[in-house]
Image: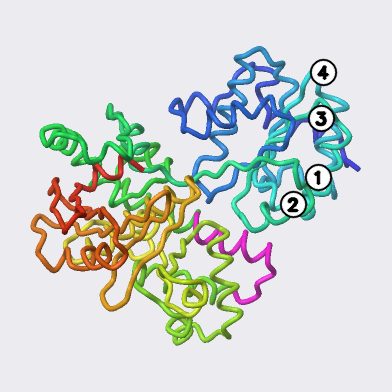
Amino acid sequence: MIRDSLGFRAELEKINEWWFTNSVKEARLYPLKREQFEILKKELENPRISILIGPRRVGKSVLIKQTIEHLIKNGHNPRNVLYYSLDDPSLSVYSDNLLKDIVDYFLENIALSGKKYIFLDEVHLFDKWYKWIKAFYDREKDLKFILSGSSSTSLQKEANVFLRGRTFEIEMFPLNFFEFAKFSGIKVERIDYQELLKLNEFEVRRIQHNLKNTFKEYLSVGGFPEWFKIKNQSDAKLRWFTMLIEDIPKKAIYEDIASLFGIRNVKILEQVFAFIAVHQSKLLSYETINDVVKLDRSTLINYIEFLKSSYLIAEILKFAGIKEQIKAKKKFLVIDQGLRNAILKDYEVKEDNLGFIFENLIGIALFLFCKKNDAKLNYWKPNDEVDFIISDKEIIPVEAKYKNRIRENDKDNLKNFMRKFKKDKAFLITKNLYGQERVGKSSLYFIPAEIFLLSL
């Protein structure tokens, strides 16, 4: 039940200003749209519940506001569109069952006839959110829910159990390099994955020249889109890295994970994340991590799962059978390069940290590419290591070496993999080198980083 319905309505009207203005201010501040906008736009006419999932600050709220603007521009009555973020405390003082009360109030006092759209941001923060969404979904036939959240474990698990067959998930991550270049105002085209090997060298050099400074910037600040809001301000980088730490890992760990999973000693969870960030791209055993954080094995595994579910880290397993994968060391990557740099205070990319930064960047790009295409990403290590193994329609080994000069021993591991598994191609991602080298009947392709990233 709502306490003080007049106050409740006044707050709701402030949040949903388009009921009076017929436009969405935040959507105009961010005119560039990501590919998820087109996916969500198509979903608007589908009655199933749309769920946006991704890390904090990745642009889920902006996407929602852009979608609301699209609805209004295309003739939907603004009063039939409701938005609320469950991490906003402004309405919680009026109700003990906010999610139910806000939807009921909207349907009874604001909405008109016709299809209605309800956007609920950070819905995972509301206890038993799925119970009320299911009730409204089953009861109201002219109602479309669009939900967002920053915890895949909470949203996906509960949606799969309580909303089975009623949902469609859209994942959002930090900007990939192609998107980052677009947001930087550079005219650039995606390169088809299959066309990587067919470019002429002049075209490769032209693309590299146009993207040189943008790539350096991307290596440093990462892909969270809010960078473009502050990049031209004084002390932008220092402010950016401070904001990344305060708004992403700290809130994800201390607010999202701690409250969702009832973790008491949150400081140790933060230490696990920091340890992984320091040792990103290295092979780690649970025992190595536990030498520092002193947890029992099952608790540590749970903590790592929590970090993965909040989109702070990615885990890469060994290219091997399941039994060996379970026993083998894991490779962990921080989900965004700028976030990793902020944690380690690597505010400038230098020669002494470039190798790990570059491998993490390529690794995350490959991880997200594989996730999007339902492929697998592993590493290989019999004696020496191959950084990444893509298992899609074909198996392709990939090494990341950001060097001007590639030596023979930089190629050895890829060649060994191709020979052992009889694979016909391998990629070595380089600083400048573009071309190929025959390895028996197979080919080792050298591809500059900017070119490779445009294909993912």
Give how far across and how far down residue 237 sits, in percent. Answer: 31, 49
Q: Quadrant of the C terminus?
A: top left
Q: Secondary structure at mark 4?
A: loop
Q: CA distance from mark 1 to mark 2?
A: 9 Å
Residue that mark 4 sits on: 112
Q: Quadrant of the N terminus?
A: top right
Give how far across and how far down residue 256 sits, in percent. Answer: 62, 59
Residue that mark 1 sits on: 98
Which label number is shown at residue 106? 3
- Residue at figure coordinates x 25%, y 40% from the top left: 196
Give how far across and how far down residue 43 sits, in percent. Answer: 64, 29
Q: Is residue 273 left or right of residue 167?
A: left
- Residue at figure coordinates x 82%, y 18% from the top left: 112
Upstream in sequence: badge 1 or badge 2: 1
Q: CA distance from mark 4 to mark 2?
A: 27 Å
Residue that mark 2 sits on: 126
Graded by Cα atoms within 10 Å as few (under 14), some (14 to 19) or many (20 or more), the crowding at tag 3 reads some
Seen from this angle, which residue lies furthest top? Answer: 75
Q: CA distance from mark 3 to mark 1?
A: 12 Å
